[in-house]
Image: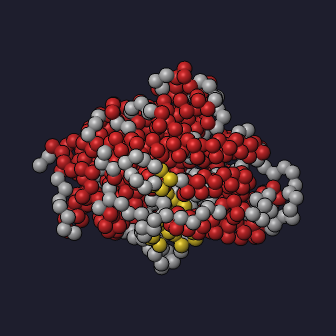
Amino acid sequence: MLSAPPLRPRVRLITSSVLLLACSSVTRSSVTQTTPPVSATTAAPAASPALDLAAIRAQYRAFDRLRAVLGWYTRTQGEPPLSALLYLGREPLFSAASLAVIDSALRRPDLAAEEALGLRFLRLALASERVSLQLAPFDDEVNAASIAAKVRVAFDSQPMAFLHAPLRLATERDAGRRAQLYEAISRVTLETLNPILVRKEAAAQAAARTAGYADYVAMSEELRGTRIDSVLAEGIEYVKATDSIYRVTADRVAREEVGVGLDRLRVSDWSRLFASPSVIEAFRKEMQLPALTMFLSGIGLDMKTLTGGEVKIDDSLHPLKVRRAAVFWVDPPADVRLVVKPQDGMQDMGTLFHEAGHAVHMARVTITPWEAAMLGQSNAPTEAFGEFFRTTFEDPRFLARFKAFLVARGQPALSNAQLAAVMRRSTLQQMNYIRRYAFAKLLYELRLHGRSASQDGTAMALLPAPDRVRGDDDASLRELYGQALSVAYGFTLNEAESARYRSDVDDTFYSADYSRAFALAAMMHDAIRRKFGVDWYGNPEVGKFLTEQLFARGTSLSAEDVAERLGFPRRMDFALAARRARAVLAAADSLERSR
């Protein structure tokens, strides 16, 4: 996952949860897809003197780099967020006059295709910054409040940092204590964060309209390069296609990891479940970076940059460091930074692999200009690269190599039953992600951001009590969030769990990028197997292909471009992702039965 300013059309600070090509030119269709809507074009003249094009490009590149470094310090050192201060005095850069200068440059008949693509990305970025500028104070307020907040529970004499509480959920063995801790987290969310987020939502709606869009949803669709309701439609079908296998798998894994069935599972158990205590010996923190190196070297990749340096890896345990892993694209390909706070567990190793996908991607970017490399419209491709790396743990052929890797380092050999358990847990997590993002979150966020209940369509039929979520008031929003997430998880959320209805929101529908990325990652696995064989994990030609066809192009490719380069039609195949889940679970059952 990329961690970045919320309203950006792309992300460079990549958290938990990226794309390029070698030297081929951008097709005209790829260029025209990024043209801003007429409603968002320049109108009134700016009050400040206009900058020339060279100054606009230089200043925005400097601004972008400073923001990445400040974000890195905030995440690694617990420094207070300074987004609002970073915008001070930069109003001319984000003015209508600057957009007009770019529009004029785009009308030049002699403009090269990649130069035009970069300028279109720059224009979209500057237009979105005009909204981000209005929301930066709210983001800083939320981040500062999160850093300062403490969580208090009866079973611990000392208050716990709010940002560290999720780690405790993953390591706490007692279900009752996990529930208490989750309720304490929810209280902070309700009492401290939600009031800020209510004000931010109102400001975001107003800023989107001021920028010339019909509403926040329309602005987000322009930034993401996709129709949100179309992605939601895919999510609905995915829920229907996977519901039976999801519930059976979730029930089994829950019983094995936390001792209760799906009907008694709670959201507070989820982190513990995916830490996977039953196989945690294979995922100790000291094994995680070496395992990543093993995977990368097998396919001809590493953590080096094209400029001869290394991706900077910060694995320190600073007490104020944010737990979630992240990648910061400070100045690719020379300066790419990966931040981890190592913890034992399968989910942590998977997250490291995901983030490495972002880092390796941008450490190999060659396309120019820099705007084409850095400011692409959608982050679905880069998130797909991360998921492609992470979901290698669903493949028994990679797990055979992983088993040999552990044995070579003096670790116990994993049994076939344990390898099957890893496949089951990874696939369950992926199914949960798609159900949450492509269905539940998109349905809820469309309503949160102003679309009426009458536009929810067939999604409402999947809810247990749709008549209770027809309103647009705060109580109805919370009810809709609770019901939608209940469908996604497979059990009914309680009041504490639905309290995150304001904070569990991805700005400008980044959830749509995630949704499409999950489907695209499944397509990547299918394409790589077809091209390089089922056991491609020892073939250096895989890395060469990924670099030349995808990574070298930075963020210039759309998700549809990636699909086409992999040999698919220009659409995300969610049905393929559902078939992959069924196939992996069947393979896990077969492996478990074998000797």
Task: Please identify the residue farthest to the bottom as the structure is shown.
Answer: 308
How many numbered dots are placed on residues in this image?
A: 0
User: From the viewer's perspective, is 433 left or right of 225?
Assistant: left
Q: Residue furthest top?
A: 467
Taking the view exactly as shown, the residue that stands out farthest to the front is 157
Q: Residue furthest left?
A: 595
Where residue 349 appears, as percent x and y from the top left, is: 35, 58
In the rendered view, would you say 472 is above or below 367? Answer: above
* Near-viewer residue (121 or 47): 47
- Can residue 426 be seen by looking at this rendering? no
Q: Nearer the viewer, residue 303 or 315?
A: 315
> Quadrant location of residue 46?
bottom right
Q: Residue at x 44, y 74 (%)?
A: 304
Q: Is residue 478 left or right of residue 287?
A: right
Q: Measured along the vertical axis of the image, is residue 387 above or below residue 39?
A: below
Where residue 191 appears, as percent x and y from the top left, is 57, 43
Q: In the picture shown, does residue 338 fall above or below 161?
A: below
Drawn side of residue 207 relative to residue 177, left or right: right
Q: On the image, which quarter does residue 540 sit in? A: bottom left
Where is residue 122 shown, x and y percent of the image?
A: 69, 60
Residue 354 falls left or right of residue 120: left
Colour scheme in use = secondary structure
Residue at the image point whose x is 34% and y is 52% from the top: 171
Query: Percent position (x, y) of residue 510?
Result: 56, 47
Residue visible at 53% across and 64% down in the picture: 78
Q: Residue at x 40, y 53 (%)?
A: 157
Asked whether residue 139 appears in the rendered view, the answer is yes
